[in-house]
Amino acid sequence: MPGSLRPEVLAGITRVFTAIEDFVYIGLGVLLAGSAVTLLTKSVVGFWHGLMSGRISTIEMVDRILLILLVVELLYTVQVSLREHTLVPEPFLLVGLISAIRRVLVLTAEFDAMLAQGSITPQQFAVELAVLTALILALAVSLILLRRRRVMAAAVAPA
């Protein structure tokens, strides 16, 4: 029973769990940073080759850029979690927003090819686009409300 443990034992257990949590966050941060650098390097090399050959795929480049932003935002989320030992909702909302925007861009850019292959119907396209639009609006409104709440809390807090 937790109530029967002495306070110094509970404090020791808490320190061990905090150290493990920090270790995991550091590992995640290293993996995400490596992924971001690898994606950026591959994107620069791909852009250079496309530039030299005269065939730059704008859609593919924008998709890669948004993927890199997504990974960097996840890295920021890990950084905040490591520093503050709390989950802050804004980075997660931003990751969701970037993901939804990325999906809209890819979906609209590849619609003709998907339609020609028969892998999507115009109705499926419209439904997915509507759902993504609603998701983007909900995430954007959530971000605005959270930031407004933070500004209002800072204004009310004593200096």
Image (cartoon, helix red, strand yellow):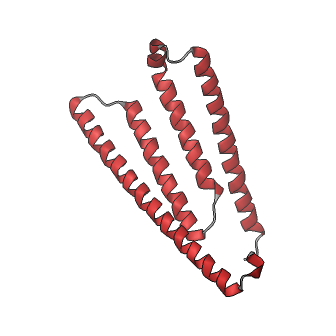
x and y percentages locating residue 29 in the rendered image: 45, 61
Quarter occupied by the N terminus: bottom right
Residue 157 versus residue 75 in the image, above or below:
below
x and y percentages locating residue 103 in the rendered image: 52, 33
* Residue at (70, 54) in percent of width and height: 146
Q: Quadrant of the rendered structure where residue 16 is?
A: bottom right
**In this image, 55 relative to 74: left or right?**
left
Q: Quadrant of the rendered structure where residue 52 is?
A: top left
Which of 155/44 is in front?
44
Quarter occupied by the C terminus: bottom right
Residue 101 versus residue 121 in the image, above or below:
below
Count numbered badges in the picture. Answer: 0
**In this image, 53 relative to 128: left or right?**
left
x and y percentages locating residue 109 in the rendered image: 46, 25
Which of 13/52 is in front?
13
* Residue at (50, 18) in percent of width and height: 119
x and y percentages locating residue 120 in the rendered image: 53, 18
* Residue at (71, 61) in percent of width and height: 151
Q: Quadrant of the rendered structure where residue 101 is?
A: top right
**In this image, 127 relative to 36: left or right?**
right
* Residue at (61, 21) in percent of width and height: 126
Residue 118 versus residue 47 in the image, above or below:
above
**In this image, 39 relative to 16: left or right?**
left
